[in-house]
Structure formats: structure tokens, C-alpha cells
Image: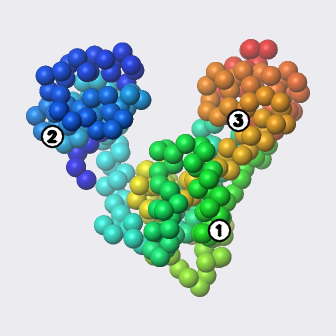
């Protein structure tokens, strides 16, 4: 893949960038883009969301002018993709893909899903709209997931906050994720037998060496044909499908929590989460919060202070 980099900037910076690249603007702007410019052989595309993509030429150096961390981030990303490069035709393999959701959200469960997709299913999956869930609305994600349940084989594991709070003091987060991915993959492989996927792609959350280190401590280890890639959903529909199933399950869990509590339980780990947690604490103390929140997050202390 060519030299490219994406940074996220504030609206103010975006404005400054538009001014700075005024003399380099391209005549055509892609859909949803704020502006597109070309400096030397580097193409710069800025989106209203504040995401700015730099491609080709001096992409990194150009991005670093606006976000000094861009160059170091890119180096780290390059390392992982180099050590774990996928076969060129991987997208057309019969593969298991696995992903997780909820890990960065203070409230709600962690969901891991492993899904199997073979080439004969790919046209249908594309027809159903399966792609990177970050490009889909929650409503679209739910509709696709409802269809997927009848189309592909998958295994999903749900770790409720209560369970998470039990495990977390003894397992660090990455070790927990490894255990969950491995378990979902292991169960799915059993369902599929005697069919064997050509490869297993894990949406990468830790270096492969780290994954394998934690894997060594698990039972029912799946060790062969493992591939790792960040943004795995871009490399195989199985990861995209797994991600959509996880996300739907996570949204359902937040909805259920909202119904139980009588107010909206937000995802993420921002001020809204602190506020929701403070309400829960007020109603039922730590015992109640334990049912809804990942207690080791800094949000717990912030919520206590709000009381
Ligand atoms: Mn992921």
C-alpha cells in the first residue's frame, strides 16, 4: 500500500488548513469532503468530520505539520502491518473473522464475535450492505445484523459488566480480549468442522507476539492459520460481519440497561457516562453500578465526585 496517513483535527485547524492549501486546491472535491488539495505528489482530502487524509509523496511530513503525532503513529502502524502482511488474495478466502465491541465504553458489556464467511456468500453479504461498520448508522447496522443471523455461522460471547468486574482484577484487558477471541474462534471452528477455514483474521488490538503470549495461558488454544490486521474489516467481510453483530448486541444491551434504569445509558467514556454513573450510584450505590459499568475506568471516581 502506498504512503498514507489520516489525522483528526479541530474545526479551527480545519479552517486554517483550508486557507493554507488555498492555492493547491483540486478542482474536484470528493463527496462528503470539505476540500481536496495537492501539494507536490501528496493528495490531501479533508472531511467535515475533521478527518484529514494525506496520500502519496510526503504524506507523513505534510500531516505532521498539523498533527505532530502523525509521524510516530504511522511508524507504529507500519510495523504491525509489515510483520503481519496478509496474502494478496486474502479477501476472497473462506475465512473466520473476529472482532470485539464495548471495550472502550464505560457502561455496557464487552462483546466478541467470530464469524465465518466463504466466497459463495460474499455477493449476498455485499448486497445486504456488509462493510466497515464505522461507515454505517446504528440503524443500518441493526438491520444488517438481523439478516446476517440467517446467512452466516458465527459465535458471539457477551461479558456483562458484572462478569467483567469479576475477571478484570486478575486478567488485564488485553489478556481478557485474547481469551474471548480465542474462545469464540474455537467454538466456531467446532461448529464448522469438518469444514476448515483457509485463514482466521483477528481485528488486531495487540501485537501478535502479545496475543500468542496470552494465548499460551488459555485452554482450547487456536494457534494455526491466525492472521492479524488493524482495521481488519477492510480486509475480509468476515471481520466486517463480526463487527456488525458485536455492535448490534452492544446497542441492544445499552437499550436494555436504559429501559431498566429509566434513562439513556450512553456508550463511550465521556462526561455523559460520568453523569449516568452518578445517577446509578445515587440510586443503588456500587452494587448497582457494578451491574452496568466497568468499574476500573476513571469514570467511577469522577461519578463519585459528582454525587
Ligand atoms: Mn476491533
CA distance separating discs 3 and 2: 42 Å
Q: Nearer the viewer, residue 211 or 22?
A: 22
Residue 103 screen position, x and y as percent? 61, 42
- Circle 1 SS class: loop
Q: Quadrant of residue 119?
A: bottom left
Q: Which mark is residue 160?
A: none
Q: In the displayed orientation, state which residue is furthest to the bottom.
A: 194
- Mark 3 or 1, nearer chain start: 3
Q: Residue at 47% across / 54% down in the picture?
A: 131
How does the figure colour the protein chain or chains?
rainbow
Q: In the displayed orientation, state which residue is furthest to the right.
A: 284
Do the CB atoms of the residues marked 3 and 2 lie less than 8 Å apart?
Answer: no
Residue indicated by mark 3: 107
Q: Residue at 55% across / 69% down in the picture?
A: 116
Q: In the displayed orientation, state which residue is furthest to the left.
A: 40
Mark 2 vs mark 1: in front: 1
Residue indicated by mark 2: 57
Residue 160 screen position, x and y as percent? 75, 46
**Could you tell me which quadrant the C terminus lies in?**
top right
Residue indicated by mark 1: 150
- Circle 3 SS class: loop
- Circle 2 SS class: loop
- Mark 2 or 1, nearer chain start: 2
Q: Residue at 75% across / 26% down in the picture?
A: 277
Residue 301 appears in the rendering: no
CA distance separating discs 2 and 1: 46 Å
Amino acid at each position: 500500500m502506498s504512503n498514507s496517513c489520516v489525522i483528526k483535527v479541530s474545526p479551527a485547524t480545519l479552517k486554517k488548513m483550508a486557507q493554507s492549501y488555498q492555492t493547491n486546491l483540486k478542482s474536484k472535491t470528493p463527496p462528503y469532503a470539505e476540500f481536496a488539495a495537492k501539494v507536490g505528489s501528496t493528495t490531501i482530502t479533508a472531511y467535515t468530520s475533521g478527518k484529514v487524509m494525506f496520500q502519496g509523496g510526503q504524506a507523513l511530513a505534510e500531516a505532521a505539520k498539523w498533527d505532530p503525532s502523525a509521524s510516530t503513529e504511522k511508524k507504529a502502524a507500519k510495523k504491525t502491518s509489515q510483520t503481519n502482511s496478509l496474502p494478496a488474495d486474502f479477501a476472497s478466502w473462506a475465512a473466520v473473522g473476529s472482532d470485539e465491541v464495548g471495550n472502550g465504553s464505560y457502561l455496557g458489556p464487552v462483546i466478541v464475535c467470530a464469524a465465518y464467511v466463504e466466497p459463495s456468500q460474499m455477493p449476498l453479504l455485499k448486497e445486504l450492505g456488509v462493510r466497515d461498520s464505522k461507515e454505517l448508522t446504528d440503524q443500518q447496522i441493526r438491520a444488517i445484523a438481523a439478516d446476517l443471523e440467517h446467512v452466516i455461522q458465527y459465535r458471539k460471547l457477551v461479558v456483562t459488566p458484572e462478569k467483567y468486574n469479576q475477571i478484570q482484577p486478575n486478567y488485564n484487558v488485553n489478556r481478557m480480549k485474547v481469551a474471548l477471541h480465542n474462545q469464540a474462534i474455537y467454538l466456531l471452528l467446532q461448529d464448522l468442522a469438518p469444514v476448515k477455514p483457509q485463514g482466521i483474521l483477528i481485528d488486531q488490538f495487540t501485537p501478535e507476539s502479545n496475543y500468542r503470549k496470552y494465548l499460551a495461558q488459555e485452554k482450547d488454544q487456536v494457534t494455526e492459520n491466525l492472521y492479524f490486521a488493524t482495521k481488519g474489516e477492510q480486509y475480509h467481510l468476515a471481520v466486517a460481519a463480526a463487527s456488525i453483530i458485536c455492535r448490534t448486541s452492544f446497542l441492544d444491551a445499552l437499550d436494555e440497561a436504559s429501559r431498566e434504569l429509566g434513562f439513556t445509558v450512553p456508550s463511550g467514556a465521556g462526561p455523559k457516562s460520568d453523569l449516568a454513573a452518578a445517577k446509578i450510584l445515587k440510586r443503588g450505590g456500587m452494587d448497582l453500578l457494578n451491574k452496568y459499568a466497568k468499574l476500573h475506568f476513571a469514570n467511577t471516581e469522577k461519578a463519585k465526585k459528582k454525587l
